[in-house]
């Protein structure tokens, strides 16, 4: 079962709120609010701290059968750029609020509603986690983040986030708030608060999927879904959120015995993604969706190691440029390795093929600008098939894994010793434990690949 980081405490809106709903019992206030806004919970479920993996969650009061409705959220109860009290202004200024993330309108809605004395969402905010205690790595000291998560890809992802957040805040968000001082009190004009709300949206918001015919459109903006964001995460979840024109419905997907927790899922996510976006991990070996990355440029580096003469090096770089032209590789891309297969199979298969093929064959393919559909079954990159790959492919893959393992500060045995010694493990800080789980899962996947390419 997941060790969750969704520790929820009473969070009063900045500047106050409805004291009747924000009394000593935030759950009672929230349930009262649900009745007022038409958010209907099944009598078979309860919002509770008891019997949950972390903080508030939802528990079955009675046995629930697959297909049963757990709760219904009317669209008017959603908190989004379209439902907040400044929705008309956000719509009018939509052009000025465009950003790389696409989250600015929702974040401005949250900044306004948090400090609005009579915000209709105040009782909902009472079940939010305490913003000053979010556990995402973006809130860890930089030195600790780099030391504990070196090699995992998390520090680089966080640094990009922090740079984007800062740019977005000073170029778009702060000027907008300063232009409308009557809607945003000075206390919410804070980069620190903006960081916290970005992390909250990252972890707790929902994004309505596009209809199949709308696949070419921009993704829908994020929105906050009261009640749905109370559910904790488990890959083997037992509930699913369904969207309809007037309501969002949480429906049971399998039997839920009385007293058991109701879980949603955040999707198939590796531990590095879970810690980065949600602030927790699945302890090894629970996360069957875990992955390890091999940076694309690492495969290029491994291939270059095998060149002796300058002509060989130049030919290899020519092959790499060809792969770039095919959009199979890039300077910042990664090949993603899962427990059972390579998730970026086409990209890695094509890369191994182009880098390892005889020179004459490469010249012919380049002159023809590609090759036909001649994929061989033995070239498939499932774990059971990797030992059957051509020797040159296996060698390049093995060299790439070895280079990737060198990017971590510690080796697999060090991690195994920490995990196998309960006395030592329990003395580690929460961050040290979470980071260890991320590193260990990735290294186990890489070592499995190492064995298969031997």
Image (tube, rainbow, N blue to C red):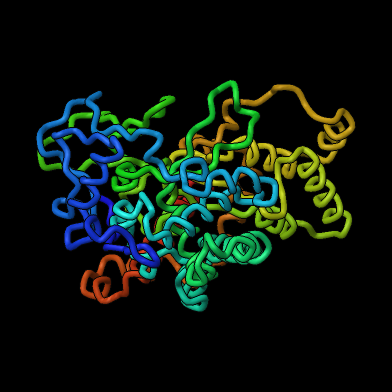
Q: Which of these two is toward me, 88 or 376? A: 88
- Going by the image, does 66 lie left or right of 164? left
The residue most toward the front is 182
Residue 12 place in picture, x, y as percent = 32, 64
- Residue at 41% across, 29% down: 243
Q: Which quadrant of the view contains residue 136?
A: bottom left
How many tags in the picture? 0
- Going by the image, does 119 lie left or right of 211? left
Residue 128 place in picture, x, y as percent = 33, 57
Q: Specify whether residue 436 is in view.
A: no
Q: Specify whether residue 440 is in view.
A: yes
Work out whether 168 lies above or below 99: below
Q: Which of these two is toward me, 40 or 161? A: 40
- Residue at 86% across, 54% down: 314
Work out whether 310 lies above or below 394: below
Residue 386 place in picture, x, y as percent = 53, 39
- Residue at 10% across, 34% down: 62
Q: Which of these two is toward me, 162 or 46? A: 46
- Going by the image, does 247 lie left or right of 369? left
Work out whether 112 lies above or below 206: below
Residue 8 place in picture, x, y as percent = 28, 59
- Residue at 87% across, 59% down: 310
Q: Which quadrant of the view contains residue 402?
A: bottom right
Q: Which of these two is toward me, 3 or 122? A: 122
């Amino acid at each position: 079962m997941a060790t969750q980081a969704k520790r929820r405490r009473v969070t009063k809106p900045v500047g106050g709120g409805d004291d009747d709903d924000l009394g000593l019992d935030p759950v009672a206030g929230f349930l009262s609010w649900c009745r007022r806004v038409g958010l209907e919970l099944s009598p078979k479920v309860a919002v509770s701290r008891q019997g949950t993996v972390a903080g508030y969650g939802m528990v079955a009061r009675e046995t629930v059968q697959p297909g049963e409705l757990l709760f219904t959220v009317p669209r008017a109860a959603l908190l989004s750029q379209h439902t907040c009290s400044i929705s008309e202004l956000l719509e009018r200024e939509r052009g000025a609020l465009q950003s790389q993330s696409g989250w600015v309108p929702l974040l401005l809605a949250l900044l306004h509603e948090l400090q609005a004395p009579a915000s209709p969402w105040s009782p909902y905010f009472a079940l939010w986690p305490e913003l000053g205690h979010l556990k995402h790595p973006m809130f860890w000291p930089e030195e600790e983040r780099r030391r504990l998560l070196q090699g995992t890809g998390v520090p680089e992802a966080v640094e990009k986030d922090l740079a984007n957040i800062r740019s977005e805040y000073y170029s778009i968000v702060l000027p907008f708030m300063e232009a409308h001082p009557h809607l945003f009190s000075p206390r919410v004009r804070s980069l620190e608060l903006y960081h916290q709300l970005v992390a909250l949206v990252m972890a707790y918001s929902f994004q309505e999927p596009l209809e199949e015919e709308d696949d070419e459109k921009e993704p829908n903006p994020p929105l906050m879904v009261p009640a749905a964001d109370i559910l904790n995460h488990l890959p083997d979840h037992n509930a699913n959120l369904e969207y309809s024109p007037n309501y969002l419905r949480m429906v049971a997907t399998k039997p839920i015995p009385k007293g058991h927790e109701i879980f949603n899922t955040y999707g198939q996510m590796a531990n590095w993604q879970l810690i980065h976006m949600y602030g927790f991990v699945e302890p090894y070996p629970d996360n069957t969706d875990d992955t390890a990355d091999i940076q694309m440029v690492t495969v290029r580096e491994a291939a270059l190691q095998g060149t002796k003469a300058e002509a060989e090096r130049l030919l290899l770089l020519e092959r790499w440029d060809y792969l770039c032209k095919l959009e199979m590789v890039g300077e910042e891309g990664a090949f993603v390795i899962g427990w059972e297969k390579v998730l970026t199979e086409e990209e890695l298969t094509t890369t191994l093929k182009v880098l390892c093929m005889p020179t004459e064959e490469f010249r012919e393919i380049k002159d023809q600008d590609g090759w036909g559909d001649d994929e061989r079954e033995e070239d498939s990159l499932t774990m059971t098939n990797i030992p059957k790959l051509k020797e040159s492919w296996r060698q390049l893959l093995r060299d790439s894994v070895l280079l990737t393992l060198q990017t971590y500060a510690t080796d697999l045995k060090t991690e195994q010793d920490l995990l196998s010694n309960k006395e030592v493990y329990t003395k580690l800080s929460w961050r040290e434990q979470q980071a260890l789980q991320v590193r260990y899962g990735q290294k186990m996947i890489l070592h499995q690949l190492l064995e298969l390419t031997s």
